[in-house]
Image: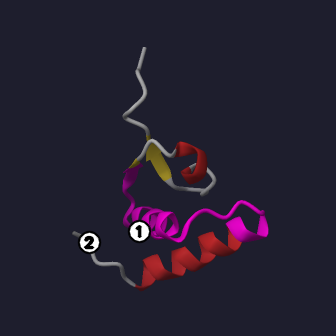
Amino acid sequence: ILPFGPEAAQAYGEIRHTLQSQGQLIGANDLLIAAHAKTAGLILVTHNTREFSRIEGLKIEDWAITQP
């Protein structure tokens, strides 16, 4: 378990501001998850790629899709 530090909190605010100004805001919990993963340099594994793909610089993978 990684602590949610000031860098993640700053990223949360920046991501929220960017998405809100684009009219594409996602849920608060998803914003927290994205900010935490982004600042820790982690890959976010999710089937919710539609929303998380809006976040620039966030690495995401969907393990639920079938690879050819």
Residue at (43% x, 38% y) in the render:
62
Residue 52 % position (x, y): 55, 52
Residue under pointer 1:
36
Residue at point 53%, 71% (across, down): 28
Instruction: Identify the residue at horizontal 62%, vertical 75% (top origin).
Output: 14
Give amino acid for label 1.
Answer: His
* Disc 2 and disc 1 in contact, CB within 8 angstroms: yes
Q: Residues within 10 Å of mark 1 (few under 14, many from 20)?
A: many
Nearest the eye: 42 or 4: 4
Q: Which is nearer the eye, 39 or 23?
A: 23
Where in the figure is residue 23, as x and y percent of width and height?
77, 63
**Structural crowding at the residue carrying mark 2, measured as other residues with C-alpha within 10 Å and reported as few (<14), some (14–19) or many (≥20):** few
Give the main secondary structure, helix, strand or loop, of the magenta stretch. Answer: helix
Instruction: Please tell me whether residue 42 belongs to the stretch shown in magenta.
Output: yes
Taking the magenta stretch, the answer to whether it contains residue 46 is no
Badge 1 element: helix
- Would you say 34 lies left or right of 43 here? right
- Classify residue 20 as left or right of residue 36: right
Tag of residue 1: none
Q: Position of residue 10 (x, y in %)?
A: 52, 81
Judged from this view, the residue extending furthest toward the right is 22
Question: In the image shown, does 27 or 61 lie closer to the viewer?
Answer: 27
Q: CA distance from mark 2 to mark 1?
A: 9 Å
Answer with mark 2 or mark 1, whichever residue precedes in sequence.
2
The scheme the figure's colours follow is: secondary structure
Query: Residue 60, how many percent across, how many down?
Result: 46, 46
Residue interval drawn in magenta:
19-44
Image quarter of the C terminus: top left
Q: Secondary structure at mark 2?
A: loop
Disc on res. 2: 2
Picture quarter containing residue 63?
A: top left
Q: Which quarter of the image is occupied by the N terminus? A: bottom left
